[in-house]
Structures are given as C-alpha cells and as structure tokens.
Amino acid sequence: MRPAPPPLPSASAGLGLRRGLLSALQAADRAAFDFLECAPENWIGVGGRLGAAFEALAERHAITCHGLSLSLGSVAPLDETFLARVGRFLDHHRVPLYSEHLSWCSDDGHLYDLLPIPFTEEAVEHVSVRIRRVQDLLGRRIAVENVSYYASIPVAPQLALDEATFVNAVLERADCDLLLDVNNIYVNAVNHRYDAAEFLRRMPSSRIACYHVAGHYDEADDLKVDTHGAAVKRDVWQLLAEAYRVHGVRPTLLERDFNFPPFEELLGEVDGIRALQRAADAPAARPAHG
C-alpha cells in the first residue's frame, strides 16, 4: 500500500461539507472546525464555481471522505472503474480517511438507499472479500460504518448473528477500520430493543478510526429515524461521551445534511464535540492532601 497522508489528530472535530453550507464554510474562521468530510461521488468531476469552491476549501482544511455508493454488501460486481476515480480523488486531495457504509445500495442500478446486510457468516465472508479488494485497489486501509436500519433481513435462527458480532467479524476478517456512528447505535438500540452502551462496549477500540454524531427524528418513543436533519439529542451526546471513555478520543464529525440552522448553531455543536474531547482527555482529579 502507498504511504497514507498524516492522520488527523485524535482530538479533532469536523463538519460535513454540504453544498448548502459552502458560503458559510468559505467565510468561517480557519479554526472553527478541524476538518471537513465529503462524499467523493458528489464532487468528482465537478467544475465551475462549485468545483473552485471545493478546491479552495480542500487547500485550506483537511478533507476526509465518506462514500455513498460503493455498495459493499451487494452481490453485483464492484464498480472498479468508479473506485479508480475515487482513488485518484483521494490521492489528489491527500485524504487521510476514506470510509464507506456497511450496507448495500445497488443491484442492476443504484437504489438510492443504504440497505442492511443479513447478519450471517456467509455475509461476513462475502463483504469481507469485497472490502479487501477495495483496499487492494486503493492501496490504503478504509473504514466501514455501522449503519442504521429499520427492518432485519430474515435468516434461519441457527445462522443468525447479532449485529455487534457481525460488525466485529467483518472488521477482523477484512482487516479494516471502523467508523463508529454513535447516533446509529442509539437509533438502532431504540428501534431493535437492545442496549446501546453494551453495543458500544463490544466494538473494538483498536479499529476505531473516527466517530460520527448526528441528529435524528423522534417518530415515537420506540421509533427513531436517522435523518441528519436536526440537532444532536442529549442521549446521543451522552453516548459519545461514553464512547470517549470506553474507546478513547478519536476524530469526530458532526453530520448535518439538510434543514440547516444558523451556521453559528452548527459551530456550537462542533464546540460541543471539542468540550467532550477535552473532558475525556483531562487528567483525573487528584485527591487533596491535608
């Protein structure tokens, strides 16, 4: 594998690079956030005013990439032509982290949704082979994200794995990293009736490359929808603090895709990430001596 760009500092807080935020991001103080994250397929080949704005931001700030369409869990062949374009984009912008979703989103064509993979040993092997192939073609490690899902694919009970076992098995067999989405843990824990803190503890600290945090929609007490269209909820902030306590501080991204508030409110949430990181890194208080 080619030498990777320098990694992001562990105590860093980023913001999603969305077209609706371009003007605010360009006008923001350099220290307002530590990095930006984009979906490479939304920017590859983009020219004109938008392309120039992206290039200017990429020269000023570290850029990470979070893909939307690689479809790691699909049975359709990997789009290696597209992957080569992604690789050139990553190299050109010196991207320190490329991640994708542990899901599938294509068959004969793009389905424009992130669909769950069945939690079975057969699926572990299938997706792990594809991740290893992606890493070989890109010449770099990637991270995969635990995704939100609303219905489990039915499998025979004797073949079924629980979600945490499935994620761990993929990471081990593919020898890749984990992008741990804290909001997705919370949403899935409510919707599928499991303990979020227990799931969090079962993730492998040594493979966590980055965290995501986002807002969700409260459809009902027992149904949460991962929208990225609202402020981060208190329970998710608390789970992020627990993630730092259990696994350590890592670069953490605030995701917001639409329904943007005043930009100062987004920066306030970025500062909320930084405050939790500082608290997690602070030395334990020493007992007073008389």
Image: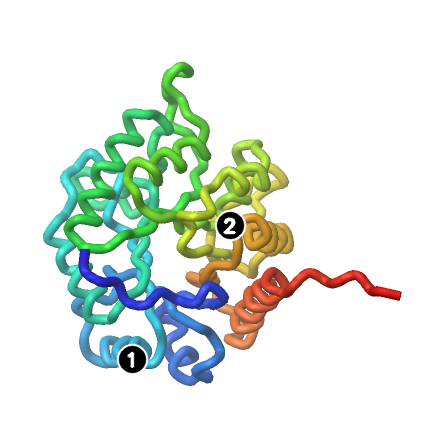
Residue 282 seen by the camera:
yes
Residue beneath the point at 42% across and 16% down? 157
Q: Distance between the residues labelled 2 and 1?
A: 29 Å
For the point 54% across and 76% down, the residue is: 264
Residue 186 percent location from the top left of the image: 55, 44
Residue 285 placed where, x, y %? 73, 63
Within 10 Å of the Cα at label 2, are there few (<14), some (14-19), or many (20+) other Cα atoms?
Answer: many
- Residue 11 located left or right of residue 289: left
When the figure is inspected, residue 7 is found, relative to residue 124, above or below; the finding is below
Q: Determine which of the numbered discs, if any, sits on residue 182 in the image.
A: 2
User: Which of the two residues, 197 or 38, is positioned nearer the viewer here?
Assistant: 197
- Is disc 2 placed on a helix, strand or loop? helix
Q: Hey, which residue is sitting farthest left in the picture?
A: 81
Horizontally, residue 225 falls left or right of residue 178, namely right
Question: Which residue does the image show at 38% across and 69% down from the upper left?
Answer: 36
The residue type indicated by label 1 comes to: Glu
Residue named by callout 1: 59
Image quadrant occupied by the N terminus: bottom left
Q: Quadrant of residue 193?
A: top right
